[in-house]
Image (cartoon, grey):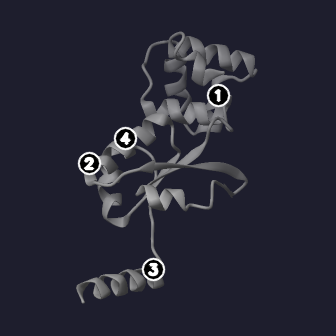
Amino acid sequence: MLSKRIFETDFTTALNEELERKNLTVRDLAELTGIPASTLYKVTAGERDPRLSTIKKIVSVLEPGHDRFIAIIAARFLLDNLEVRETDVNGKSFRIRGYSANSLEECIIAAARAEKDGASGIVCAPILASIVEKIVDIPVGMLRPELSVVSEAITTVAKKIG
């Protein structure tokens, strides 16, 4: 498995072994990943160190079902009540993994941790999305509460005010 092998040896060796094991050429990999063949030839020859985004594309193609998940950054009480733990989109299955955060700093740390853990994307509050997009190299989506939820929150606060 490529994703484990790259930590046991160098990326070039692990990639070449995986290509041989799957009986794929560099040109085949280029077509599957959308990465230029010239770039992949340099990587497989050890002439160039790949960028993290290049490695992610290669691993996602060579190990399509490998722990694919979407991270949700939210307060613990929201994560505890989350009913969806897996979703299918366009024939691809994604697990949902929660990252608890209660402050801006915790949200930034959670986003960095989710990307490091291998998240395919992140969902967070709208106020955080623009910040998170600047620190990660994966898609970021926003939680959009229903208007009824916002109205309920306003009513709750109004009752507390008196």
Residue placed under numbered mark 2 in the picture: 105
Decide which of tag 3 and tag 1 comes sooner along the chain: 1
Camera sees residue 61: yes
- Are the two marked residues, 4 and 2, in contact with CB atoms closer than 8 angstroms? no
The amino acid at mark 1 is: Arg
**Separation of residues labelled 3 and 1 (CA atoms):** 51 Å
Residue 112's disc is 4
Q: How far is disc 4 from disc 2 in space, using C-alphas?
A: 11 Å
Secondary structure category for the residue under label 3? helix
Tell me the quarter of the picture where residue 62 sits. Answer: top right
Per the image, label 1 sits on a secondary structure element best described as: helix
Residue 125 position in % (x across, y down): 38, 63
Q: Which mark is residue 149?
A: 3
Name the residue beneath numbered marker 1. Answer: 27
Given residues 14 and 44, the one toward you in this image is 14
Q: CA distance from mark 3 to mark 2?
A: 25 Å
Of tags 3 and 1, the one toward the viewer is: 3
Relative depth, front residue between 93 and 155? 155
Identify the element where label 2 is drawn.
Answer: helix
Report the residue at 37% width, 80% height from top.
153
The percent coordinates of residue 148 (x first, y second) are 47, 85
Q: Amino acid at mark 4?
A: Ala
Position above or below: 12 against 160: above
